[in-house]
């Protein structure tokens, strides 16, 4: 069977954008997860590094937004500043066909001033590291109450780094009926715990290569 992105229910403009980006066939994890991800289910996807997990959740984030509504509606938590930057860049490519999507990166180790300023102006998608995102919530600068899709990216690394409590606190700030996505290169007991406490009947996709 063809693994073309064309079989997915995406806007025609996004289909054209994917072609321009040189994405023709889905990778295994994209093919296994995108139908459930796009239909709004909670999904846990495991696949090795470099297998295309960012597109597997990124297409959903871009697709779920009400662009005229200037509030964070999607959240991606990443373990490090570098990864948050990479994810934000990848999302900007997927968002190219829409003029006004604003993505805000909130990483630790960066000055707070510009992050306050970005949040004042507003945006649709927050990509950040758990410590800084929690800090900004506690400072009253970040309101996640309209977040309807959350993503834990590189969840294994994030939990190994001791972010479990921060992640739970942050997810509890999001809409209770949100869609929760989790992507990881490996599975461990901490991920099982998050799946049980923070997600609703997730679809598990294990070990695609
Ligand atoms: P992971 O998060 O699984 O480590 P990434 O999302 O960073 O992987 O993707 C790895 C690389 O594969 C990136 O350079 C990305 O642009 C590319 N890529 C993703 N999906 C596709 C696709 N369907 N076709 C071709 N290249 C892709
Ligand atoms: Mg990744």
Image (tube, rainbow, N blue to C red):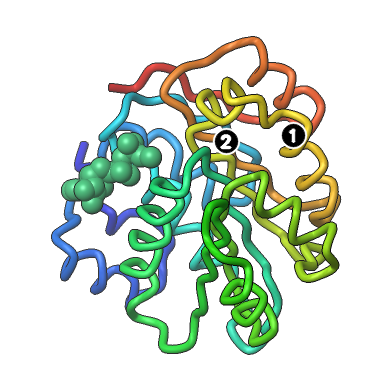
Q: Can residue 4 be spotted in the picture?
A: no
Q: Nearer the viewer, residue 149 or 102?
A: 102
Residue 166 lies in quadrant: top right
* Residue at 32% across, 54% down: 7
Query: How far across and down, in percent of the image, does residue 102 sit?
Result: 51, 78
Say whether marks 2 and 1 touch (CB < 8 Å). Answer: yes
What residue is shown at x 53% (from left), y 46% (from top)? 37
Task: Give how far across and how far down residue 190 sits, in percent.
Answer: 67, 17
Q: Is disc 1 surrounded by few (<14), some (14 to 19) or many (20+) residues within 10 Å?
A: many
The image shows residue 139 at horizontal and vertical percentages of 83, 64
185 left or right, relative to 190 = left
| The CB of the residue at mark 1 lies under 8 Å from ligand 2 | no
The residue that disc 2 covers is 182
For residue 51, above or below residue 119: above
**Residue lying farthest to the top in this orientation:** 189
Ligand 2 falls in quadrant = top left
Q: Residue at x 33, y 77 (%)?
A: 96
Looking at the image, is 177 positioned above or below residue 62? above
CA distance for labels 2 and 1 = 9 Å
Q: Which mark is residue 199?
A: 1
- Up/down of 76 relative to 167, above or below: below
Q: Nearer the viewer, residue 126 or 203?
A: 126
The answer to whether any part of residue 64 appears in the image is: yes
Nearer-N-terminus badge (2/1) = 2
Q: Secondary structure at mark 2?
A: strand
Query: Residue, x 58% and y 25% (percent of image)?
Result: 161
Secondary structure at badge 1 equals loop
Q: Taking 184 as reference, is 119 left or right? A: right
């Amino acid at each position: 069977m063809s693994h073309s992105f064309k079989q997915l229910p995406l806007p025609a403009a996004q289909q054209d954008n994917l072609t321009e980006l040189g994405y023709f066939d889905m990778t295994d994890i994209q093919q296994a997860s995108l139908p459930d991800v796009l239909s709004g289910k909670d999904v846990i996807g495991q696949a090795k590094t470099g297998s295309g997990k960012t597109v597997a959740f990124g297409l959903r984030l871009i697709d779920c937004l009400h662009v005229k509504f200037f509030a964070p509606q999607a959240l991606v938590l990443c373990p490090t500043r570098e990864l948050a930057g990479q994810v934000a860049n990848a999302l900007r490519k997927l968002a190219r066909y829409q003029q006004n999507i604003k993505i805000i990166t909130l990483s630790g180790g960066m000055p707070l001033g510009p992050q306050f300023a970005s949040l004042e102006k507003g945006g649709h998608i927050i990509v950040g590291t758990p410590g800084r995102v929690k800090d900004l919530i506690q400072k009253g600068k970040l309101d996640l109450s309209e977040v309807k899709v959350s993503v834990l990216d590189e969840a294994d690394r994030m939990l190994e780094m001791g972010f479990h409590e921060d992640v739970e606190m942050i997810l509890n700030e999001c809409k209770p009926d949100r869609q929760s996505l989790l992507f990881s290169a490996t599975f461990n007991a901490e991920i099982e715990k998050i799946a049980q406490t923070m997600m609703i009947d997730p679809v598990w996709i294990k070990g695609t290569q």
